[in-house]
Amino acid sequence: MKISYLFPSFNVHGGIRVGIEHCNHLAARGHDVTIHNVGAMRMPSPWIEINPRVDVIYGPLIDPERDIIVAMTPPTALSLHSLKTRAKKFYFLQMAEHLFAPKNHNWVTQCHYSYKVPFPIIGISRWVEAEIRALGRKGEMYYIGNGVSDHFKPGKSDGELTILVEGWEPKGNAAKDVLNYGPSIAKWAKEEFGAKIIAYSAHPIQTMKNVPDEYYCQPDPKTIVKLYQRAWFMLKCTKYDARSCAPVEAMKCGTPTVRAIDKGDDDLINLQNCLRSKYTGGYDEILHNVTVLANAASADVRYSLSKNGLKYAKENLNWNRWIDELEKIFAA
């Protein structure tokens, strides 16, 4: 099949990562795959590899002579809707996008229109599906999961208590850690337990600059793997995520996560492969979960979560499984 994915940019973002993984694996299976970056912004840094079999083009004009065209954002979904083409159209929706900027009326309106496009939506989150159904989506929807690449694997953790905080800087995104729970709890853990704090984010550090012992902005894939491997556990706090990459990447490295989230992350199961709590109003419970995993006597708990996480990853986070499902959707 001739398949095009419409990317908004190559910004460092979990949604971009997942879209590139789709394209890489589809190309590896012999499909003619094109990443069409309609934003025309080139890769800012080598934060993810693109299979050399994948063609990359830039600019707003969309090639209609394809078998499959997949939009990845509200603007590209609306552009695809107006495109005259013989291609099958799909919208790969990875988040209830209006929640990123709920006070931006124009953005919210555009998102709501995109949820009602008359072609199938491929989603990765049960709560996002329910959310957009409630907003009036009547059309066909498919549900798939994400995989995690094999270069995420267990390694040697630091000898001293080391906590990795992912997503340190929310950068005005209303769905992320708007209350700065991650930095605040990291500061507390450093004072309470003498924990070493390492952190990474897509943005330069602005918040509590003196807390992290090490801070990485837009780290490359090899560095990210090392950070997961070094940490005793990861802390990630957000209001919403459809299916965030970091906790499952850490899971495949054998690193459990203390997760605070109100809705999302279908792969994270409390007391099985993570310690999970609500974000809104959940500060005390997050502190409790960090205390459980930071305590020197909790090695058995960390081991159990790690073991269960590795088992879950092996059974559920294999890209071949989900690319099989994707090919079936495209061929239907």
Image (spheres, grey):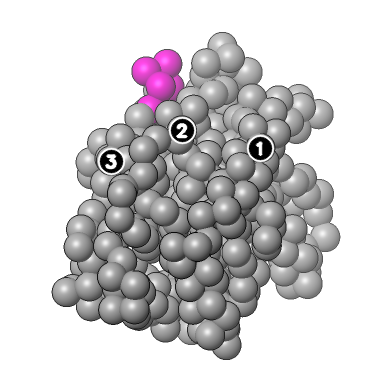
SS at badge 2: loop
Query: Is residue 236 at all visible to an observer of this figure?
Result: no
Q: Is residue 244 above or below residue 16?
A: below
Q: Is residue 42 above or below residue 97?
A: above
Q: Amino acid at mark 1?
A: Lys
Left or right: 183 in relation to 33: left
Q: Assess whether mark 1 and mark 3 are in contact (beta carbons under 8 angstroms).
A: no
Q: Is residue 97 above or below residue 152?
A: below
- Circle nearer the N terminus (3, 1): 3
Q: Assess whether mark 1 and mark 2 are in contact (beta carbons under 8 angstroms).
A: no
C-alpha span from label 3 to label 2: 13 Å
Label 3 vs label 2, nearer the camera: 2
Please report the bounds of the magenta region as a residue range: 50-54
Q: Which residue is mark 3?
A: 223
Q: Amino acid at mark 3?
A: Thr
- Circle nearer the N terminus (2, 1): 2
The image position of residue 16, as x and y in percent, is 44, 45
* Residue 225 or residue 3, whichever sits in front: 225
Q: Which residue is mark 2?
A: 153
- Residue 301 picture quarter: bottom right
Q: Amino acid at mark 2?
A: Lys
User: Looking at the image, which residue is at 20% across and 63% down?
Assistant: 213
C-alpha span from label 3 to label 1: 24 Å
Mark number displayed over residue 311: 1
The image position of residue 106, as x and y in percent, is 49, 76
The image position of residue 128, as x and y in percent, is 68, 62
Left or right: 206 in relation to 16: left
* Residue 70 or residue 79, whichever sits in front: 70
Of helix, strand and loop, which mostly describes the magenta segment? loop
**Crowd tier of the residue under label 1, counting other residues whose Cα lies within 10 Å: few below 14, some 14–19, many 20 or above:** some
